Amino acid sequence: DTAVSQTPKYLVTQMGNDKSIKCEQNLGHDTMYWYKQDSKKFLKIMFSYNNKELIINETVPNRFSPKSPDKAHLNLHINSLELGDSAVYFCASSQDFLKPSSTGADTEAFFGQGTRLTVV
Amino acid sequence: RKEVEQDPGPFNVPEGATVAFNCTYSNSASQSFFWYRQDCRKEPKLLMSVYSSGNEDGRFTAQLNRASQYISLLIRDSKLSDSATYLCVVRRSNDYKLSFGAGTTVTVRA
């Protein structure tokens, strides 16, 4: 069973379109993330949710909107796609390592296989 | 200045060699440190956590130097399968955010 799964794996779309990427984790984790990896391979955090609550919202254009219907899912919707949005988007999850009872194992982030988005 | 900086490499080494590289972090409030491994066109995966006293996991040794704000990774007896990009990751205390370096590419040749 895949621990963190995201769909689609590849997405090619035209500028100006709206698209969504879905992410689901079956690890029972409390925290989920979206990261963007650009052509220089730099992984930059976009959003983090803990128990469906938005915790981190980095400087990301308003065209990007995350939605967490439950703590096992964190979807990413992108409006009015631009050429510069082309990148690999990774979803990840981890246990709630800020709990007092957290152990070192709780800090590991498990990543989905990535969604390669190409805007043409 | 980036929060986490790494020498991008590439480090090209023969099988059996030892390779080592560092990562520096800018925020002294950083609390937890990790090395992740990312194979080409794959997702990052945790290689090992880095503890204050340094730690080993098989052929991999990680060190932390808080005074100089850097961590290091050493790979002994390199295997072809060690070829990958190694990502340095730090987390501040009381913060969910994992900050990644841009990665150090290692290529092990036969």
Image (tube, coloured by chain):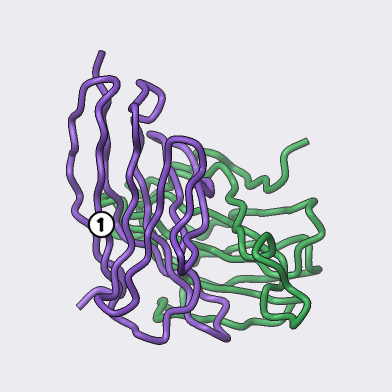
Chain colours: A green, B purple
| Residue at mark 1: chain | B
For residue A120, above or below residue A52: above
Q: In the depicted view, which residue is nearer to us: B65 or A68?
A: B65
For residue A11, above or below residue A60: above
Q: Residue at x 41, y 24 (%)?
A: B81
Q: In the depicted view, which residue is nearer to us: A22 or B37?
A: B37
Farthest residue in the front direction?
B53
Q: Secondary structure at mark 1?
A: strand
For residue B10, above or below residue B83: below
Amino acid marked by disc 1: Asn
Q: Position of residue B107 (x, y in %)?
A: 26, 29
Q: Position of residue B60 (x, y in %)?
A: 42, 41
Q: Residues within 10 Å of mark 1 (few under 14, many from 20)?
A: some
Side of B19 relative to A105 (left or right): left
* Residue behind mark 1: B22
Side of A7 relative to A47 (left or right): right
